[in-house]
Image (cartoon, helix red, strand yellow):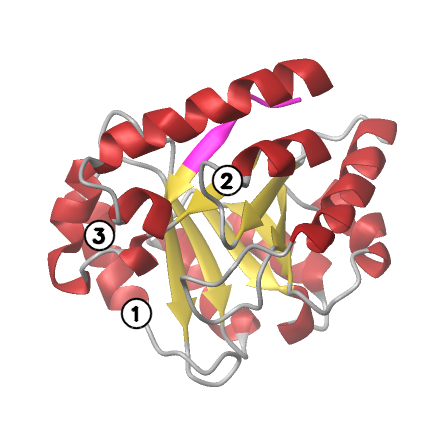
Amino acid sequence: MNPPVIAPSILSADFARLAEAAAAVEGAADWLHVDVMDNHFVPNLTIGLPVVQSLRRATTIPLDCHLMITDPRRWAVGYAEAGCEYVTFHAEACDDPVALARDLRAAGARAGLAVDRDTPVEPYLELLPHLDMLLVMTIKAGFGGQEFLPELLDKVRTARRRVEAGHLQVRIEVDGGINAETIEAAAEAGADAFVAGSAVYGAEDPAEAVRRLRARVRPQLRAGS
């Protein structure tokens, strides 16, 4: 299994001080998770490409961009061209995930596919060889601060079995309600990338919060590897 990745979500940070939010986890976080919401695919409205471009210039931390938008074929490549390391789009919003993943890779990013709370993962398992990451929502996409839904880890287990059986280099990321109490279960289920919002940016010391999360997940990955 891949080494664990902790990706603080700037959705829980102060949007007026995103550069400072990035600096607060510099040296501790592996990625910064950037939630792009369009008020169509999900009810919330957050940030778009110009802000992500500015954030890219403000930090050296790799950006993990999660597009919760209705038309990813139109916009996703722009985020790759802006320098995002990962660009993840939703299965529910794209009729040809393989083609979009190919376009993202050609633009220099790694391609991720997200499945929302109510979306079965099984129809997308055959696409894993074309992807770099599968993002399993452990809440309903759209808002931070929701309670973790442990039953959604069955999707993680299913995906992990397929990744291992196919000897694939595909990360499995979980997003929603990840904190010191839930991250171990997610790791045990087979996730190796963990998005944490309020658990990091709600802490007095965000960098130390990242380190504490990493310490909780390492034993689980060793046991499952």
Q: Residue at x 54, y 79 (%)?
A: 70
Badge 3 crowding class, 10 Å Cα cut-off, few under 14, some 14 to 19, many 20 or more, is some
The region drawn magenta spans 1-6
Q: Mark 3 and 2 residues: CB-CB less than 8 Å, in contact?
A: no
Q: Can you tell which of label 3 and label 2 is closer to the viewer?
A: 2
- Residue 15 on image: x %, y %: 19, 63
Quadrant location of residue 121?
A: bottom right
Q: Label 3 belongs to which residue?
A: 55
The residue lying toward the viewer, choosing from 208 and 128, is: 208
| Residue type (three-letter) at the residue carrying disc 1 | Ile
Is residue 210 on the magenta stretch? Answer: no
Labelled disc at residue 47: 1
Left or right of 162 in this view: 180: left
Where residue 148 sits, quadrant-wise, is bottom right
Figure quadrant of the C terminus: top right
Residue shown at the point (83%, 35%) measured from the top left: 161
